[in-house]
Amino acid sequence: MGSEALWFFAGALSFQLLSRLFRAGQLITLSTEVGARLLVLAASVHEDIYFAREIKYKKLREDGVIGDQLELITALDEKATDAWRQGIVFKFQDSLPMSLKSVFSFKDWDGAMEFMRKNMK
């Protein structure tokens, strides 16, 4: 009778442990998919920024802005876009709970885009 109870409790404990491991795995999978989809959204906004910039530069050229002025505007826009990309990655990383920081280990825009491509199926 005693060994049966021991086997029962060992089975119950094993079940609980495996259930928790399975739920943790599901949470990591879900978090990875949600994070990758958020990065898809950020990449789409990034593309829209570049599209808007091209329209802006075309209009500036039509209005006679050329040479150094256009180069300065382009350089400033590129710096602003770089800062936006860095801000997105920083805010993304900063908003993660500690338990997920190792899942999203990228530190820059290129790493975030690589993570997105790898995890979007």
Image: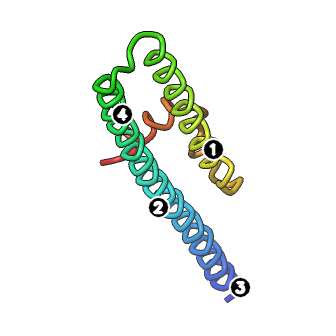
Q: Which residue is mark 3?
A: 2
| First of labels 1, 2 by sequence position | 2
Along the line of sight, the residue nearer the viewer: 94 or 57: 57
Quarter of the image that includes the N terminus: bottom right
At x 39%, y 48%, the residue is: 40
Q: Amino acid at mark 1?
A: Ser
CA distance separating discs 1 and 4: 40 Å
| First of labels 4, 3 by sequence position | 3
Q: Amino acid at mark 3?
A: Gly
Q: Amino acid at mark 4?
A: Lys
Q: Which mark is residue 102?
A: 1
Contact flag, marks 2 and 3 (Cβ < 8 Å): no
Mark 1 vs mark 4, foreground winner is 4
Q: Secondary structure at mark 2?
A: helix
Q: Secondary structure at mark 4?
A: helix
Mark 4 vs mark 2, foreground winner is 4
Q: Is residue 82 above or below residue 116?
A: above
Mark 2 vs mark 3, foreground winner is 2
Q: Which mark is residue 56?
A: 4
Q: Secondary structure at mark 3?
A: helix
| First of labels 1, 4 by sequence position | 4
Q: Which residue is mark 2?
A: 30
Residue 39 place in picture, x, y as percent: 45, 47
Q: Residues within 10 Å of mark 2 (few under 14, many from 20)?
A: few
Task: Name the image quarter holding residue 16.
Answer: bottom right
CA distance separating discs 4 and 3: 81 Å
| First of labels 3, 1 by sequence position | 3
